[in-house]
Image (tube, rainbow, N blue to C red):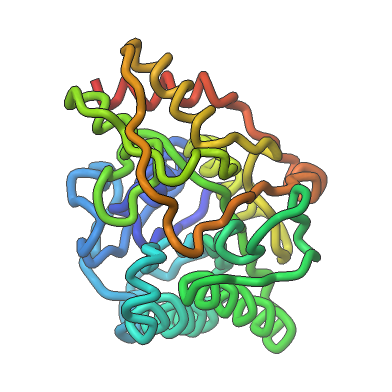
Amino acid sequence: MAPVRAIVTGGAGFIGSHVADALLARGDEVHVIDDLSRGKRENVPEQATFHRGDIREPLDELFAGIQPDACLHLAAQADVRVSVAQPDFDADVNVIGTIRVLEAARAHDAHVVFSSTGGAIYGECQRPAREDDEREPLSPYGVSKLSGEEYLAAYNRLHGTRHVSLRYGNVYGPRQDPHGEAGVVAIFFDRLRNGERPRVFGDGSQTRDYVYVADVVAATVAALDHAGGVFNVGTGVERSVVELFEACRRAAGVDVEPEFAPARLGELQRSVLDIGLAAEALGWRPAYGLDEGLAETWRSYS
């Protein structure tokens, strides 16, 4: 791929900062847009140009100054609980914010790669979910992400763009904040590091598709060179929360038992993604197994 001038929205956050790192390593020019409501300024690589801004505000002037070739759109309201409590706020960020990005990108013919979600869109999975399976979001967050996907698809039809939506599995890795909308790996490792017992809700049999952040970044960068579509980004392997806890405990080298708490209302019991289409169309497959990814993650916590 030839070097590009890229904007990364949410580039001070967990996944976005890793995407910015990967683009710089390729020799791309990188501009990060983040309002720092969740992201951290120290996550932004030194070689990137940082712009503090909110994607809900008009972005035309900023895009005009940068003249981007591509926009990797990772800024989002990503907390399911917040989306239930404040669905209007969730839609404002994830729907209106995405429209702002699409309109600014359209003015400069910039290719958009959109970070969506697998588990929150498909609902309960009877088998690894494929991109054409029924979409049954159980939260306003899932609905808002699905709306973003539909806007990208409509722009592709209406304006002849080639934007790509990526449905991420449960992403984990270094820089994930153990607070707020944190993933379970970050929460488990934070408690293990502090000598506390991690909490498992329900009996721990609920499953997820845990994918390491470096693999997610590789798929996101690969999508820069693809002419539109929707792709799952996971591992195709489901792990129960109890299995994940055991793997985290091994990675941390500690002997502790989890603390069990009542199941949370409305929690998915099974979520796993079929990644065959991404492998075929993007030439991408995950390179990290769970144990390897957890070992890398634990090193960043210790």
Image quadrant containing the C terminus: top left
Q: Is residue 197 left or right of residue 95?
A: left
Look at 71% across and 55% down and name the residue there.
125
- Closer-to-camera residue (205/122): 205
Look at 46% across and 81% down and name the residue there.
95
- Closer-to-camera residue (260/155): 260
Occupied quadrant, residue 122? bottom right
Occupied quadrant, residue 84? bottom left
Q: Where 117 sits versus 215, above or below? A: below
- Closer-to-camera residue (237/32): 237
Q: Position of residue 240 (x, y in %)?
A: 57, 36
Look at 44% across and 35% down and name the residue there.
25
Looking at the rendered structure, the number of numbered marks drawn on it comes to: 0
Q: Position of residue 298 (x, y in %)?
A: 34, 23
Q: Is residue 66 left or right of residue 143?
A: left
Occupied quadrant, residue 146? bottom right
- Closer-to-camera residue (267/229): 267
Q: Where 76 sits versus 43, above or below? A: below
Q: Position of residue 215 (x, y in %)?
A: 56, 37
Q: Where 67 sits versus 248, above or below? A: below
Q: Is residue 37 left or right of residue 73?
A: left
Q: Where 40 sits versus 248, above or below? A: below
Look at 70% across and 39% down and name the residue there.
236
Image quadrant containing the N terminus: top right
Q: Position of residue 34 (x, y in %)?
A: 27, 63
